[in-house]
Every structure is written in structure tokens, then in C-alpha cells.
Image (cartoon, helix red, strand yellow):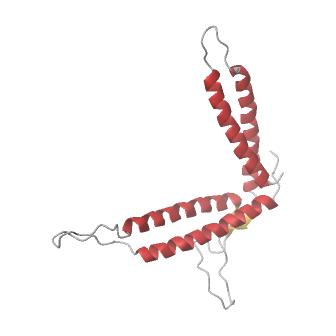
Amino acid sequence: MKLAEALALRADTQKRIAQLRVRIAANARFQEGDEPAENATTLLAEVELAVDELEQLVRGINATNSVIELELAPRPARGTGGRRREVGAAGGQTGTMTDALARRDTLRLRHAIIVESAAAAQDSGVYRQMRSELREISALSVGELHAQATSLAQELRELDSRIQQANWSHDLIDH
């Protein structure tokens, strides 16, 4: 099984567990003289098997992620005559898939912070009605923030593409 397939199966298993939890709660109590729609004990046994399956998947995914090596950030283009690409802090370094996932999470966080900062710094469209009212001035350069957000988004897309490629090219380690 490829890593990508295991990831999809993990997501499906997590959804199935969530659905079973709802069904267990809905059938855990019933009125005397009535019958529950489903047997809560049977549902508990089913969710126990699903949780065991999830554990095996997560262990295999984690073991696989810890041995896959991939490039964390693109290497700077040299001598191509084209536009030179900006390189993030990882600058052509390689690491494990686990490192790449951590990098992707922090890139998403950085991007969100920059986009939020640019939105907060933009002119709100509220204008002074009288000259005696104080003007609001942006403390941040919105243009620079947008450029930074664009660069982060590109780095994020490229890293995500490398992660997806690795997911489909590596087999899951059985655990």
C-alpha cells in the first residue's frame, strides 16, 4: 500500500470512528419498553476494532514518514538566465517527511499571519468627516506584506507538491 493510500484510509477510519461515537451515544440509553435502534454493545465492539485499525495505520504512517527523505525547500536557480527564485530559511536542505510536514505547518501559519497583518494594515475605508478627526496610518507596508505572502504561498505549494509526490512514490512500512 502506498503512503497516500494509507493517509486516505486513515481519514476514512477517523470519520467512521466519529460516526460510531455518535451512534453509540444515541443508543446508549433508551426508555423502558422500547428497543434501541442499534445495539450499543455491538457498536462499542465495532469502534474498538476501528480504533485498533487506526493505531496500526498511524504507526505505519509515522514509521514511513520518519524514513522518507525529501527536499524541504527548493534550491536556488543558478545560471539559468531567468528570474532567480527566493529561497526560504530551509534553503535547499533535505529532511524527513516528518520535517517536511512540520515545515508545511509553519509555512501555513506564517502565511496566515502575514495575510491577516496585511488585511489589518489596509485602509479600512473609514474616512474622517471633519478635519479635526485624527487620521489612521498603517504601521506596516501592505505591498511588502502581500509580496511576502505571495512568496510564502509559492514555497508552500512547492513543498506540498513534493510531499504529495513522496506520498504516492513510497510504500507504507508495515508496523
Q: Does residue 58 appear in this view?
A: no
Q: Residue at x 74, y 28 (%)?
A: 46
Percent of width and height locating residue 45: 74, 25
Q: Residue at x 60, y 76 (%)?
A: 87
Percent of width and height locating residue 129: 21, 69
Q: Is residue 48 shown above or below 148?
A: above
Q: Residue at x 23, y 69 (%)?
A: 128
On the rendered structure, is 139 left or right of 109?
Answer: left
User: In which image quadrant can residue 170 be found?
Assistant: bottom right
Percent of width and height locating residue 142: 42, 74
On the rendered structure, is 168 left or right of 163?
Answer: right
Out of 19 and 59, give the one closest to the viewer.
19
Question: Residue farthest to the top?
Answer: 33
Q: Residue at x 73, y 50 (%)?
A: 7
Out of 23 and 97, give the one closest to the viewer.
23
Query: Which quadrant of the rendered structure holds the C terminus?
Result: top right
Out of 172 and 13, give the one closest to the viewer.
13
Q: Does residue 91 appear in this view?
A: yes
Question: Residue farthest to the left?
Answer: 132
Q: Is residue 121 shown above or below 14?
A: below
Question: Residue farthest to the front?
Answer: 129
Percent of width and height locating residue 157: 64, 67
